[in-house]
Amino acid sequence: MKNNKIFRERHYHLLGMVKDNWGKMITAMMCLLAMAATEAGIPFLMKPVIDDIFIKKDLEMLKLIPLAVILLYVVRGVAMYGQEYLMNYVGEDIIRKLRNQLYSCIQDLSLAFFHREKTGTLMSRITNDVHIIKTMVSTAVTGSVRDVFTLIGLTGVIFYRDWKLALLAMVVLPIAFYPIVEFGRRIRKVSTGRQEAMAEMTSFLHETLAGNKIVKAFGAESYEKQRLNAKSKRLFKFEMKSVKYRSLTSPVMEFLGGLGGAGVIWYGGYKVITGASTPGTFFSFLAAVILLYGPVKKLAKVNTRIQEGMAAADRVFDIIEMESDIVEPEHPRTLKAGNHNVTFENVHFRYEEDMVLKGIDLEVASGEILALVGMSGGGKTSLVNLIPRFYDATLGAIRIDGIDIRDVSVAALRQQIAIVTQEPILFNDTVRNNIAYGSRDASAEAVENAARAAYAYDFIQGFPKKFETVIGELGGRLSGGEKQRICIARALLKDAPILILDEATSALDAESETLVQKALENLMKGRTTFVIAHRLSTVGFASRIIVLVGGEIVEQGTRDVLLEQMGVFYKLHQMQFKQNRSDVGTD
């Protein structure tokens, strides 16, 4: 019962997207009605053709009926073009809106959603699934409406010609609709599996093509080919099941149509022989019956497209109806301009089954530079991810200037924060647009100044089109150090009062790191800064260092104080010091 309610709501949602095109829809329906009328007009003219022209040899009718046939097909041609163009326009417009709405909903979901879902799967929903819905809306729905109108028109003709004979012909129709319903149900189930298999393949292709360097480096080409073959085989099985049900539909309908035709010929022929009916009436009736079974067969095929489309719509609406874990406040509070202090009050955070942070109590003063260190998995990145509400704390609260961040709109909160991640994320756009990504209104001068401050200006000037150079997918045309400096320039340009640096210098060589470190030190002055650092040699500038182990703060203080305590920080420092000496000796 609940599922039926959900399906109805989804159908209404799709219908609601048509409202901007009601005029085109009504015109298209009139064209479909005209097409149905011309379809019914063809067998209707059979009676005067046979009785008046061939039997009565009426010359006047010989002149009029060919003109009527020409007029019939002119109207049919105009109506066919009108409905085809208008219905495709409406279909394409609905799909455009649906694709935009789907992408918008995906973008609004929390980071946890993106960790659960594969990128390729989401791409498949936006492209493949939406395309299937488009086929349903622009082709299948059009076909079903046209065929229903045609059925009504032809049914009117056969009942007008001979209602008793019409009743005989109509006995088969209810039986003919059974395979439409049954095969449609099976096709919808198979189609869901087929679309899931296609999504898996899209995800696989995205991963292996994006990671082709690793595939080649580890000689895994054969392994990946085998994986693709397995996924192709799974998709092939679903495709063949779908083909089986689609292929069965036509033979079953042909057989049932044959039964109905045989009955009409037997009873209608008997009436002509006994003089109860004329040859013209019989052939007019027979032509209408033959044409009548055509739309029924088409409806069976159209139904398969509709079922596939509804299966795709379910997958699309599963995302559209999904609610984000990050809830916007009903009455958002405003953060004051200027610098901020950040406070963690008994913060716990659970990711899936694991408690990643446990009882974090921490106050970071305005303008303070806080370094977070510890072994991998200690909770450093999880802690800073709570500040811009990529996730929400499971227990406790995070406050900026005493205001719970959950009481501030997400957009306003993130406007106060600039981030440079461990992995430099860039887009296939110009250097200028990548630097100005979070500051679209920034002047050319401001962009160039940010590049200079990040020590990126000189290498950008060496590009063929300088700041207008397109850097390729994920910045693939840049070195690791160049990509990181573009990201740092982006954070510099945003000029936010809270700064998060997640291993911001990890991809730089020694020379670049020295230059960028100076730029970061200037950037951090007066800003509340969180620095995640794996290399402890880079945290000497921090106002305070906290050591996270197992999601808990076990030590905090300045670098010198922590070294004197000879605790966890001291041990980590000694391990890295020995490692660095070993590396130097190896070199």
Image (tube, rainbow, N blue to C red):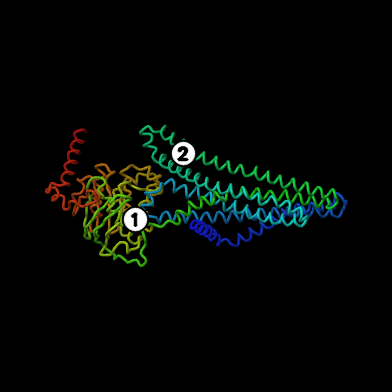
**Residue 81 image offset from top left, x and y in percent:** 65, 53
Separation of marks 1 and 2 at Cα, in angstroms: 51 Å
**Residue 295 image offset from top left, x and y in percent:** 67, 50
Q: Which of 357 and 31 is in front in this view?
A: 357
- What amino acid is at disc 1? Glu
Secondary structure under the numbered disc 2 in the rendered image? helix
Residue 397 horizontal side relative to residue 42, left or right: left
- What amino acid is at disc 2? Lys
Q: Nearer the viewer, residue 405 or 227?
A: 227
Upstream in the sequence, badge 1 or badge 2?
2
Residue 234 horizontal side relative to residue 58, left or right: left
Q: Which of 520 and 81 is in front in this view?
A: 81
Mark carried by residue 552: none
**Residue 505 image offset from top left, x and y in percent:** 27, 46
Q: Mark 2 points at which residue?
A: 231
Nearest to the eye among marks 1 and 2: give it: 2
Secondary structure under the numbered disc 1 in the rendered image? helix
Residue 558 horizontal side relative to residue 103, left or right: left
The C terminus lies in which quarter of the figure? top left
Is disc 2 surrounded by few (<14), some (14 to 19) or many (20+) residues within 10 Å? some
**Residue 304 image offset from top left, x and y in percent:** 58, 48
Identify the image quadrant of residue 146.
bottom right
Mark carried by residue 445: 1
